[in-house]
Amino acid sequence: MRFLFSAVFVFLTLSGCGAAYFSSDVQESADANVRVIPVTPETVLAANRSSYNPQSLPAAFSVIADGPNQPRGVGALPDPVFDPETRPAVLETRLPAPAQPEPYTIGVGDVVLLSTSQTATSVEELSGLLAAQTGRQGYTVQDDGAISIPDVGRISIGGMTLEEAEDAVFQGLVENRVDPTFSLELAEFNSRRVSVGGAVASPGIVPITLQPLYLEEALARAGGVEVRARDGATVRLYRDGSLFQIPASELYSGSGLRRVLLRDGDSIFVDTSFDLDAAEAYFEEQITLIQVRQQARTQALQELQFEMSLRRDALEEQRSNFRDRLEFGAEGRDYVYVIGEVRTQSRFALPYNNTAVLADALLENGGVTPATGNPGQIYVLRGAQDPRDFASITALHLDATNAVNFLLATRLELRRGDVIFVAEQPITRWNRALQQVIPTLNVSNNLAN
């Protein structure tokens, strides 16, 4: 008991002379420009209005490894075997389903002609020989559906109608500040074709142009049907694995037979009832061509996948380099600092591309220490944004003795350089003071003895 009274006496004596235990606290002071503001819904809204731009991750974290359009697949293949037939008394007519013409869409291999105006030189203008010139340049649509125009770049027009392509080119010229006075026309049609073979004057490939292509027109472009007697000739149409046929006599009889609209990839063969072997060989050739195209597309797909792999590796290397720089402190970060009666005093890194709130920083560091921390004295110390007002400090005071108020901690946004301080409980301050006084009394007693 005497020891306890001695301890109290020494503690009070030391307190009177200013040698007692002192702990950190937040005190409002007009001289030091410290303002203590209670955290309420209104003050949270006011504090969150302060300007702050979170740090952004490098572009490598938001870019994806993209590539050109995938090559188009191959349709169904026909049956490889033709059944032998004899010349029938009445040949059956089999027509494809009726279809309506659609606007021509630009495809790979087409050539567009871009005409732009070019002002004449001063000599030409003075001589009156030429007032203006017109530059005409052809561009081939490449595998990804784009054309490459000097001083403008790549413009994707694949799959567009001519009018849509004009809009795309106009937009590209405007964006690159190039005179948008131009005209655009299709010079070569190479993406949509129909093959014509058999008993025609000029077997070959017939392109589909801006005008719809019908069966009789395709035969006319191939020089027409060349047989002695049309009664024994048959026009066969191969499309997507299906075989259609029309007697040549009926096709040219003018009997009102529905016109057959052709599509890209159609194959036409004119034969007689006794020349089916030639028709079979022709279609086998077409199948072989399709297989060759499919193999080329497979190779193109493999090359595309390899290119995509290289792009992904490059992006991953950039991201890995950034993580290493971040680990060794070579990249700047925005931090807030957590001190006082928390489980771990440390700094809390503000996230990239986002904001953090008071609750994030407190709970990241283990929260308030229950045995020593004072939940009624949680502060966010924030300096003035104006560097000329360096001494001004705002202390946002959160009283979490009522747990409901901690909801405000989930809404109060943090700013770079904030200091989060949790004061100690009064009993903790008293206990720590006694722990410093008691060793002093022990030393005094030892000296007295």
Image (cartoon, rainbow, N blue to C red):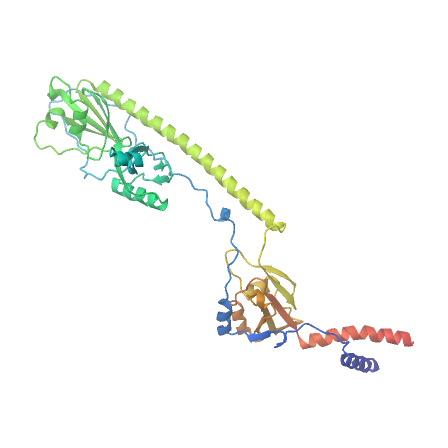
Out of 346 and 442, give the one closest to the viewer.
346
98 sits left or right of 324 in the view: left
* Residue 80: image location, x then y, percent: 29, 25
At x 62%, y 51%, the residue is 329
At x 8%, y 27%, the residue is 253
* Residue 214: image location, x then y, percent: 17, 32
335 sits left or right of 439 in the view: left
* Residue 285: image location, x then y, percent: 29, 22
Q: Which quadrant of the view contains residue 301?
A: top left
* Residue 252: image location, x then y, percent: 10, 26
Q: Which quadrant of the view contains residue 344?
A: bottom right
At x 50%, y 48%, the residue is 61
Note whether 147 is above or below 377 in the view shown: above
Q: Quadrant of the N terminus?
A: bottom right
Residue positioned most to the front: 126
Q: Which quadrant of the view contains residue 102?
A: top left
271 sits left or right of 125 in the view: left
Out of 364 and 418, give the one closest to the viewer.
418
- Residue 133 seen in the current view: no
113 sits left or right of 88 in the view: right
Q: Quadrant of the C terminus?
A: bottom right
